[in-house]
Image (tube, grey):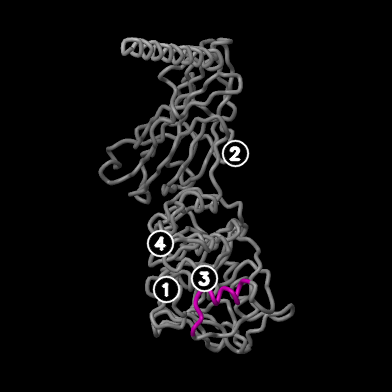
Amino acid sequence: MQKVNARTVTLTILFLLILVVVALLIGNFTFSYLGADVGDDVTTQGETTASGDTIIFSSGNTLSLHATTDNFNASSGNLTDTTNPSARLIASSRTNEANATYYAGIKINTNTYTYSSGTTADVILTVRDETGAIVTTSDDNNLSYVTVTDASGTSISGFDITGKTGAFNISIEHPISTTSSTSGTTHTWTFTITFVNYTYDQSINENATLDMDVILQKDEITIPTFADYIINEVYTGTDGENDLYFHDGIGTYTNADQEAGDNSYRYSGANPNNYVCFGATGADCQNEDNQYRIIGIFNNQVKLIKATSYGDYAWDADDVNTWDASTKPDIYTTLNTTYYNTLGSEWQSLIAESTWQVGGMAFGKTNTAKQYYDVEVETGQSGYVETMKIGLMYVSDYGYGANPEKWTTELVSVYYGTDNWLYLGSDEWLISRSVFTDRAFLVGSMYGGDTYLVNVGSANAVRPSFYLESSVVLTGGTGTSSDPYRIS
């Protein structure tokens, strides 16, 4: 009886093994017929086309330049870096023939190089296609092809990328074809960046940095909008990481029930990395007067506030805080004329015209950030709204700038500005006016960042705040004060 059972078990196992082998053979045959025979070469960079062909991309190394007195001086020659990205097309074994197109380009993440003399290119990108020929025209109109002569008398040709950041398509829908379903056809490109050593003084670029990704891919090379980047890259899905909180009202952290509940993304804490360069480019981004900070993302728009005071101004010299169709307080003109006109047209175009709640509200000694939010910008707000480009931060903006542990604390409390990056350390106007016609809300410095009401005729710090157009894109930077985000 035992022998019969053992034989039965053995036959059953053999039968199952045969079925598995047959299934594997069928699966392999199906793949070989419909897809390219790429074997171990298939990577996460590979894409199978609708016709069953496979195109595989290798992006090469990140290119970078960092000029110092040690590696760039009168006797050092040029400073360079090179990489060789590739695209490989393998035909389906059904046809042994394939045609495809791809995009070749770059994404410059950081670039603090500037022109040392006039408009002569300090940094040049030289691109050679799969034939070894230098690419002299770009499908991106923002790149100019130039030829310069370095200190040794050698000519260098390529695209002038001095000070440029962002994504650039060098070649669009570049054709590739093959008649092989095994080795396929490979296009290998050469991208070289050169900090050109001239005979004249280039010390302005001492310690300058350039960081660039070289990209070959099936689709057009684009960069995300600034808002999308913050939402999808900086916000990790865990509230509090990178000091960013999603105000959906269902967080799992301390005092999450006190969120605004408006699906905004807001920075909170002592000193988040939320710096943005606005109104300048290149080395001028290091100037604190050109630095702004992100309050948050609201309806896919990034809201900024100037990192430092624009100056001390009266909210309204006539001691009247009224907003209506015919009367606007002095703070409106200060922000939307005096300050706005200091910005060039390029930067003005990035600012969205927005609706600001300026109806006013009563002061409350026990009001928290959430309670102020509900009567300031949510359904409880009363009175007038103003459409304008430049405003000030709301009382609730300031309240939510503090660590969440403080969101149940009344904003009138002493030292509310502790661990609140929005506290400037001086008396500062807020946009919200009081129900008393001669007063408006202020962040006070005497008691470390509490909020209260003062007469609108007094002069206090003003920090312009505004919403960026939703189409604004990130072109570089990491958000620190030494490397603020760059936008365009």
In three-dimensional space, the C-alpha distance between marks 1 and 4, rounded to whole angstroms, equals 17 Å
Q: Tell us which disc is closer to us: 4 or 2.
A: 4
Residue 462 can be seen in this image: yes
Question: Up-down: is 364 above or below 48?
Answer: below
Q: Amino acid at mark 2?
A: Asn
Q: Earlier in the sequence, mark 1 or mark 2?
A: 2
Mark 4 residue element: loop
Please tell me which of labels 4 and 2 falls first in the chain. 2
Amino acid type assigned to the residue bearing label 3 in the image: Asp
Q: CA distance from mark 3 to mark 2?
A: 40 Å
- Residue holding disc 4: 272
* Res. 139 image quadrant: top right
The disc at residue 397 is: 3
User: Disc 2 designates what residue?
Assistant: 141
Q: Of the residues under marks 3 and 1, which one precedes in the sequence? A: 3
Image location of residue 284, percent across then percent down: 44, 57
Other-residue count near label 2 (Cα within 10 Å), few / some / many at <14 / 14–19 / ≥20 = few
Secondary-structure class at tag 1? helix
Q: Amino acid at mark 4?
A: Pro
Q: Which residues are magenta?
A: 366-378
Q: Image point 59% across, 85% down: which residue?
A: 362
Quadrant including the N terminus:
top left
Q: Position of residue 237 (x, y in %)?
A: 46, 52
User: Which numbered dot is residue 406?
Assistant: 1
